[in-house]
Amino acid sequence: MRTPWSEWDLNHWLTHLETRNTQEIQLGLTRVLTVAQKLNLQRPNCKVITVAGTNGKGSTVTALETIYHQSGFKVGSYTSPHLLVFNERIRINLTPIQDKDLCKAFSVIEAARHPINLTYFEMATLAALWYFKQHDLDVIILEVGLGGRLDATNIVDTDLAIITTIDFDHQSFLGETLELIGYEKAGILRKNKPFIYADLSPPKSIVEVATQLGALSYLYGKDYFYQEEANHWGLTCLGEQFDQLAKPKIQLRSAAAAIMACHLLRNDLPVSYDSLEKAMALIYIPGRLQLQKGKTNILYDVSHNPQSVRLLADTVKKINAKGQVHAVFSALKDKDLYGLIMPLKDCVNRWYPAQLHNKRAVSQEKLLSVFREAEIFAEVCYNDPLTAFEMALKQASEEDLIIVYGSFFTVSHVMAAQHNLLEQKENQ
């Protein structure tokens, strides 16, 4: 049966979702579960791994899908948000969904949802699950969007849950303490199913939820740990050693959690050491501590909370630029702005704050006031990140480093245009 949306292309669909379907965060499972049940999407016919946490979710998902792909399994993965194009969110065997398949998935969900109004993220999640259902997958890896307990991805019963880290972010939705945030993220745990906590000292709320459910808990530093050396690394999972691995281009803690998950599911999804070794060299996730080398080196990072910015600061110190360090920064108004700039205060020589073109963006006046509060000089707040980046390029010398960070919007805005800008500078 033909519908008004039968001939829509992807741009039309995305415009529709951005206007008709609210992009505001509306946590809760009733809407999305009702539609999922109509299409029988909540119980995939394969293994499911769900990844939650404040930081490191995306890199852990990428590590898992790369390892399983190298092992010959058919892998579906769902992540958010996207960096450059929406298709990045939904992948099979590391390949983003094609426009026509995404349009078909949206069409099916649109027909099934009436009269329920779904959010942008709920539509995306259901589209991913429907697309995965059309393929004979061995494993699906889901990245939680926000929290866990009430996130749309949590309609699926997972076979293994990973919580990467717990830190302050989205407090207005998840709570003002680490214990409350931990409780929300622990909502992805399942009775008698394995659960990995990928950081030291989990909040008591997570331990309590795991105990109440009878979840099989595996903790970093207790049940598995890694060792880093100059040119390689290794880890021990429940006494079994994996040595002489290539260092991946992600945090070792994320890679270790992924390998621990593979170890726990090895009876159903066996992974050889050779596959593991090959995967480590291939893991790549754009926009996360991504160093682009050239006449002027550029470091892109989507870090948007204090914990991730502290990691960025450590990375900047390791790079040890011979020249000056320039920082292009913009963020959303609900973030800890002071906490986003202070970790880099002693690393950055020149700042280029900018306002995002987003209704959640912090104002130019507020940005400058935060810099004054931090006693950091910022000459001006630019109208957008690209203008700020252009100025940083003009000011930077060949031995300098430019950091672009603060949000996915900041990095994607600059990355989408930076190729032309760099060409212009090199031709000057």
Image (cartoon, rainbow, N blue to C red):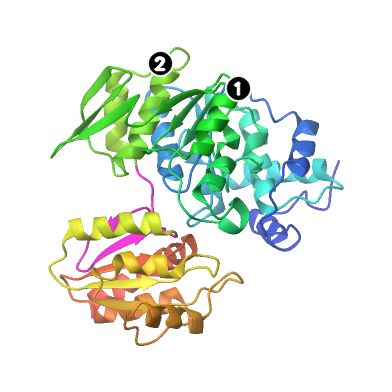
Residue 25: % across, % down = 66, 56
Crowding at mark 2 (Cα within 10 Å: few <14, some 14-19, many 20+): some
Decide: marks 1, 2 in contact (CB < 8 A)? no
Corner quadrant of residue 144? top right
Residue in the picture at 51% in, 73% down:
356
Left or right: 240, with 97 as reference point: left
Give the residue displayed 59% in from the left and 43% down from the top.
184
Image coordinates of residue 88 in percent, x first then y, are: 51, 47
Residue drawn 31% across the image and 23% down it: 275
Q: Nearer the viewer, mark 1 or mark 2?
A: 1
Task: Tell me the amino acid under the disc marked 2.
Answer: Pro
Which secondary structure type mostly characterizes the magenta part of the structure?
loop
Residue 394 in the image, given as x and y percentages of width and height: 27, 81
Q: Which residue is mark 1?
A: 191
Q: Is residue 233 magenta?
A: no
**Label placed on residue 293:** none
Residue type, numbered disc 1: Lys
In the rendered image of this protein, does residue 85 appear above or below residue 122?
below
- Within the magenta stretch, is there residue 298? yes
Describe the element under mark 2 as helix, strand or loop.
loop
Q: Which residue is mark 2?
A: 270
Q: Which image quarter: residue 62?
A: top left
**Is residue 97 visible from the viewing direction of this image?**
no
Judge whether residue 247 can be spotted in this image. Answer: yes
The residue nearer to you, when weighing 228 against 294, is 228
Looking at the rendering, the stretch of residues picked out in magenta corresponds to 284-304
Residue extending farthest to the top is 267
Residue 92 is situated, as x and y percent measured from the top left of the image, at 51, 34
